Image: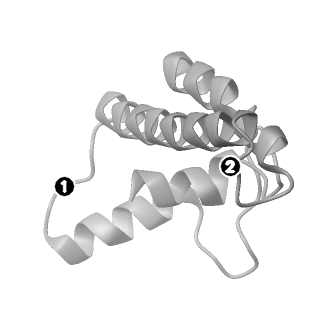
Amino acid sequence: LAYLCLTLYHAPPAAAPTPGKRVNPPAGAPDETQLVQHYCSRRGVPPPSPNVWACYLALGCYRMAAILAGVHARALRGNASASNATKVGAAAKGFAAYGLSL
């Protein structure tokens, strides 16, 4: 759920995302708090505390940073599957830093 929220609410859709910048959800989509509350309600569990939620978001950031670091490494070796892999991979540090800030 936190990983989904990172894509919807914390980074704009772009080739090299800028983590930490809040974006508006798509038209008709709930905001982050509403989405978390609805999900937890349907699962029959209480919503996480703000500190726990921040930890979940941070873990999602570290996951994304690890993925992007791999993309960057493949680009440096000339084994990338996309032409913009160097640019995308460079966003790894931004995701790691955003995770630390949470």
Q: Where is residue 31 shown, x and y percent of the image? A: 59, 62
**Pointer 2 local density, CA inside 10 Å: few below 14, some 14–19, many at least 20:** few
Picture disc at residue 95? none
Q: Secondary structure at mark 2?
A: loop
| In the rendered image, the vertical position of residue 64 relative to residue 27, given as above or below | above
Q: Quadrant of the N terminus?
A: bottom left
Where does the image place residue 53, in percent across and percent down from the top left?
36, 39
Q: Secondary structure at mark 1?
A: loop
Can the viewer see residue 11?
A: yes
Q: In front of the other: label 2 or label 1?
A: 2
Give the labeled residue for mark 1: 46
- Side (left or right) of 92 relative to 76: left
Three-letter code for the amino acid on which mark 2 is drawn: Asn
Residue at far bottom of view: 28
Give the Cα separation between the discs numbered 2 and 1: 45 Å
Q: Name the spot of residue 66 as percent of width and height, x first.
A: 49, 35
Q: Is residue 82 above or below residue 86?
A: below
Query: What residue appears at the point 73 percent right and 44 percent down from the top-left corner?
Result: 22
First in residue order: circle 2 vs circle 1? 1
